[in-house]
């Protein structure tokens, strides 16, 4: 995004980036690279696959980052959807993460702030990197300077809304909303499975990752789904080369729409 990569090849992969495909073959877990990388972006529970990372898996990433002086960007946008108590909600649950990880948190998915906009970034004060001249730089100071210079802040009314997320009433309302969407996810999983389709995710994340039926490409399935069932979803190939042959279905909708959409998909794509 910042333009520091080389050009893209015909698969859309940019030079200077190390891609970590998460596929059914590796159970949608990210395999640690064999070479040294500077920055690591991880998102668990994952958008789009709905996959999760265990404490052991994330600890291995933290250990790798510390050994290689890499920085982990941990995107925790979907942590509120975790129901399995053994899964970590934050990278800071792992030993040593405060020395190598930055975490993103957002109110977009837990409290529906996608339009109103409020989120935050955790940059631990213990996180330092080596500058080109060999000196040690505190990233917290650098980030604070960047934020207080370039960003005028979230509007006060939206901040008060975000604050209410942590009230007793707010917490109860959010849990109710999450439970509702996760019931949608369960319906989607069950109905698609009953129709003979192969699905992943949708247990600790609001996304179901569907293997496209009949060997269709992501976009061919998108077109067929739109034109024969009048249902819209997201082609997996839009998320990168490893998403080809998959399709993302979101649980963020009314019960009525979910039930209608699943009935139509089952009718048209039963295998
Ligand atoms: C929605 C989402 C976010 C949150 O983005 P905002 O800019 O806070 O709305 C972050 N990461 C992922 C993977 C998401 O899907």
Image (cartoon, rainbow, N blue to C red):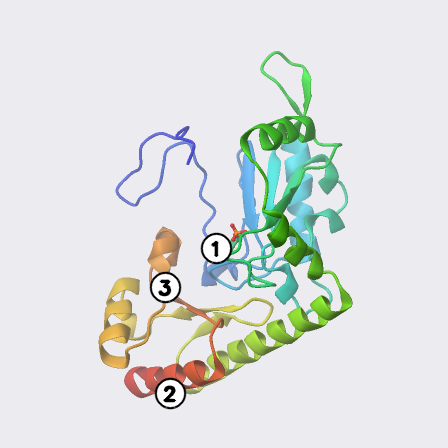
Quarter of the image for the C terminus: give it.
bottom left
Taking the spot 72% from the left edge, 35% from the top edge, the residue there is 99
- The residue indicated by pointer 3 is 234
171 or 26: which is nearer to us?
171
- 221 with respect to 202 (left or right): left
- Element type at mark 3: strand
Instruction: State how far apart marks 1 and 2 are (Cα).
Output: 29 Å
- The residue indicated by pointer 2 is 263
Question: From the viewer's perspective, is the residue at label 3 or at label 1 nearer?
Answer: 3
- Say whether mark 3 is within 8 Å of ligand 1: no
The percent coordinates of residue 241 (x first, y second) are 35, 52
Taking the spot 56% from the left edge, 61% from the top edge, the residue there is 109
Question: From the viewer's perspective, is the residue at label 1 or at label 2 nearer?
Answer: 2
Instruction: State how far apart marks 3 and 1 are (Cα).
Output: 17 Å
**Could you tell me if residue 128 is visible in this image?**
no
Q: Which mark is residue 22?
A: 1
Q: Quadrant of residue 218?
A: bottom left
The percent coordinates of residue 22 (x first, y second) are 48, 55
- Element type at mark 1: loop
The percent coordinates of residue 114 (x first, y second) are 51, 57
Q: Quadrant of residue 70?
A: top right
Tag count: 3
Residue contact at pointers 3 and 2, CB within 8 angstroms? no
Label 1: few (<14), some (14–19) or many (≥20) C-alpha neighbours in 10 Å: some
Determine whether 37 is above or below 43 in the image.
Answer: above
Quarter of the image for the N terminus: give it.
top left
């Amino acid at each position: 995004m910042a333009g520091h990569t080389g050009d893209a090849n015909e698969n859309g992969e940019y030079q200077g980036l190390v891609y970590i495909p998460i596929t059914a073959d590796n159970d949608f877990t990210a395999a640690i690279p064999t070479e040294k990388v500077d920055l690591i972006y991880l998102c668990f529970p994952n958008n789009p696959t709905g996959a999760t990372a265990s404490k052991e898996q994330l600890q291995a990433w933290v250990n790798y980052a510390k050994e290689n002086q890499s920085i982990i960007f941990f995107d925790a946008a979907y942590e509120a959807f975790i129901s399995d108590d053994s899964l970590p909600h934050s990278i800071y649950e792992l030993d040593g993460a405060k020395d190598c990880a930055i975490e993103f948190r957002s109110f977009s998915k837990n409290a529906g702030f996608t339009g109103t906009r409020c989120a935050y970034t955790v940059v631990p004060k213990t996180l330092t990197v080596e500058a080109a001249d060999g000196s040690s730089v505190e990233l917290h100071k650098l980030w604070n300077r960047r934020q207080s210079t370039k960003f005028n802040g979230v509007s006060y009314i939206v901040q008060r809304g975000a604050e209410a997320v942590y009230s007793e009433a707010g917490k109860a309302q959010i849990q109710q909303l999450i439970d509702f969407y996760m019931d949608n996810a369960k319906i989607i999983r069950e109905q698609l499975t009953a129709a003979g389709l192969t699905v992943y995710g949708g247990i600790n994340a609001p996304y179901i990752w569907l293997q496209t039926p009949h060997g269709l490409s992501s976009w061919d399935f998108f077109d067929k789904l739109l034109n024969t069932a009048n249902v819209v979803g997201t082609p997996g190939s839009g998320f990168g080369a490893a998403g080809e042959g998959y399709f993302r279905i979101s649980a963020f909708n009314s019960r009525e729409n979910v039930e209608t959409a699943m009935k139509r998909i089952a009718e048209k794509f039963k295998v």
